[in-house]
Amino acid sequence: MAKNTSLYFRIVEGRNLPAKDVSGTSDPYCIVKVDNEVVARTATVWKNLNPFWGEEYTLHLPMGFHLLSFYVMDEDTIGHDDVIGKISLTKEVIAAQAKGLDSWLNLTRVDPDEEVQGEIHVELELRREAQRTCLRCHVIQARDLAPRDISGTSDPFTRILYHNHSAETSIIKKTRFPHWGETLELSLEKGEEEEGGCVTLEVWDWDMVGKNDFLGKVEIPLACLHRTPPLQGWFRLLPLGNTEDDAGGRLGALRLKVRLAEERILPSVYYQPLTDLLVESVISPAEVEEPTLLTLLEEVATVESRQDVAMTLVKIYLGQGLTVPFLDYLNTREVNHTSDPNTLFRSNSLASKAMEQFMKAVGMLYLHEVLRPIINRIFEEKKYVELDPCKIDMHRSRRISFKGSVSEAEIRESSVGLLQGYLSSIVEAIVGSVAQCPLVMRVLFKQLHKRVEEQFPEPQHEDVKYLAISGFFFLRFFAPAILTPKLFHLRDHHADTRTSRTLLLLAKAVQSVGNLGLQLGHGKEQWMAPLHPTILSSVASVKDFLDKLIDVDHDNMSEVPQRAVFLPSVTVKEGFLMKHKAQGPTLLKRMAFKKRYFWLSSETLSYAKTPDWQVRASIPVQCVCAVERVDENAYQLQNVMQVVTQDSEGHLNTMYLQCKNVNELNQWLSAIRKVSIYNERLLPSFHPGAYRSGKWTCCLQPDRSAVGCSRTHSAVTLGDWSDPLDPDAEAQTIYKQLLQGRDKLRKQYLEPEEAAGAAEEESRPVSSTQPSGGLQRAAVPSERTRALVTRLLDAVAELERAHNTYQRREKEEASSLILPS
């Protein structure tokens, strides 16, 4: 059994931030830490005290976490960046908000005594002798302590306190991973052990000049030491507990959205009945009007949860190799329940959401290949473009001619030319990409084309079969990616104001292309008219492209590759990195890092001097044992990670890679972990430092083969379209949704027939036309429907019993002993 923790957060905007620069403004950005480890950095918003970021992230943290912190910084081109303030949210505070937190929170001051991190490994026991009682503490080691010195390390020692007694370990210089292995003893007066109280362990950074710096503490009730065997384990270091107010809002505020999803994942056997029902829904579906598990699920899913349900179902059927029949079943119901072709797939039905999520899951690499060159060009050129007369800013445009100041007409003429060029490049790239489009997408679109043509065979509906495909392909896939490239991983940062406006106008134009130009001239934005000829001239090539797209011969759907990211030939991530390979105990210098271009696929991590270099060196992904961050003091460099591999003889080899920023570092860490997450030889620990001068820079151990001093994080990843499939976690999500809706299903389908019939009559709409995505049922559920619902509720009840059993066991274990962190 495992726990699955996902943390979603969105940094929306800030307000009333204090001015840190002489100009009376600030250049704010945010750093996000989970348990003091930087997981994200927003873009800098220059000269703004009310910045908007709108950046969102999802973290998968199987081992859980304790604290989520947001630091607002002011970027300085000279010297260190200034800290404006921070917001810290404990896991308990976030979990208390069932629907997530969405509010403005005031920034607080940063207190060094509160900025603690790491864990300490100790063994504690009370020894009663004839004349005295001895409190014995074996201080073994600590890890991941906060850096307090300018070198990026600390000089830690540990102190144990109880009443007026205290003792200290030795000081270990220049490390955040000290090994003491010392035993401290306190002799207690008669009766002191009966007075209660807590044993306190404090970790301090020793300073030759000035006072020592606090590194954290642990408090353990003395009553816990009366039991045997001795209490031993890793304990999380806690801050002093100073109560810091929010400065009355004087430091400004952040608007944050944070949501925590924490699930207990049961063994696979418990989810099998639910998985069987899902498979049956598409392998041997009922009549179109008969409910299946999928239609029942759509009934109980709320509007807010429908997208998550859709993504989960897509992953489940990807894992089963049944994506095409699954989506074909939903699409067929959607098409058959739609009488007006103008409303086809216009609702937020399960079919619409599932199609969107499917295209992201299997088509993201394809989208990158098609759009990245033109998107990069738009970002690099940063041209001023505007067609709306109400928004033209004469001061923001660059000079177009040498005749003097430009006129509004010249700006519009220049904008039209630029947009036509960009739009033509986008359309040409898309219509020329038939061979690049994933085969499973083409097969699915072929099925959709067939269903729509069968439902609307009339000549006046000739374009509907094209619109059904282009609505997903252009309107819900390519246009959103053009509008917000960062959310589709096409760019590392959001566009500036000028580029953002260009992308918005292009996204509108691409939507019109996807609508085959049928709505041109009917909207309020008549100033888009200069682009209409370009849009209309693209319609014929788009139709021809869609005809070629669905011209595939794959009647046997099981032969279609279900997910492009798992194909060996597909590059999951690529880009330049600075590389160094550790070879022997030689002194490693900054200049040892060399620039190389890397490619990551599901089978290899390869690199060469340039993207066009013919000779590549490759590392099999199956040999990867750990992918972890490297301490800054190891090379006096930021954003360095290590890839530890094991060769056929069992020897470990380490390659160090430097990324250009912390976001790129986290993306590479996440990508390599995802493709290697199921490797058999993953290491439980690692060295966050480097081995040089005869010792590890992190824990100072002289043995090069010494066991790592910090825990690995193989399953800590960023959530996105390339997440590996996890059938049990996905089935758990569906179970939770059904658990919330089981009362509704029971009342609607399993109550006495008379009550069910009366309820059906009361809820029957006046119109005979069923809304798109809805269900049509007889007044009284059929025997087949009642049997299906009974099986479903039985499966849900069995899962609920299993969860309750495991939860009860966990509570019993927790009450019998104190568990270290």
Image (cartoon, grey):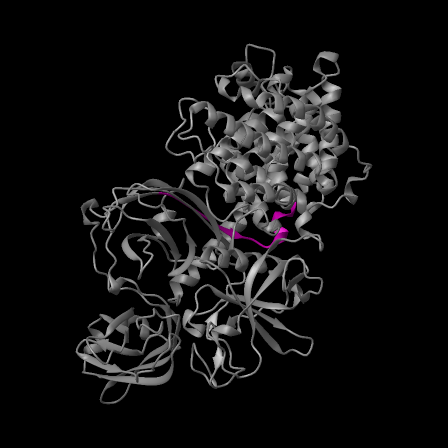
Up/down of 18 relative to 296, above or below:
below
For the view shown, which residue lies furthest in the bottom direction?
130
Image quadrant in which you'd find residue 399 = top left
Asked whether 265 falls inside the magenta stretch, the response is: yes
Q: Position of residue 58 (x, y in %)?
A: 48, 48
- The foreground one among 440 and 735 is 440
Up/down of 33 relative to 530, above or below:
below
Q: Is any atom of residue 287 visible in this view? A: no
Horizontal arrangement in the rendering, residue 40 relative to residue 786 (left or right) = left
Q: How many marks?
A: 0
- The foreground one among 652 and 385 is 385
- The foreground one among 622 and 235 is 622
Q: Quadrant of the N terminus?
A: bottom right
Q: Position of residue 374 (x, y in %)?
A: 59, 41
Q: Position of residue 114 (x, y in %)?
A: 27, 62
Q: Quadrant of the C terminus?
A: bottom left
Q: Position of residue 475 (x, y in %)?
A: 59, 29
Give the residue displayed 59% in from the left and 23% down from the top: 774
- The foreground one among 640 and 704 is 640
Horizontal arrangement in the rendering, residue 332 relative to residue 773 (left or right) = right
Give the residue displayed 75% in from the left and 13% down from the top: 459
Up/down of 745 relative to 102, above or below:
above
Give the residue displayed 31% in from the left and 59% down from the top: 78
Image quadrant in which you'd find residue 236 = bottom left
Q: Which residues are magenta?
A: 256-273
Horizontal arrangement in the rendering, residue 115 relative to residue 465 (left or right) = left
Q: Is any atom of residue 247 visible in this view? A: yes
Asked whether 739 falls inside the magenta stretch, the response is: no
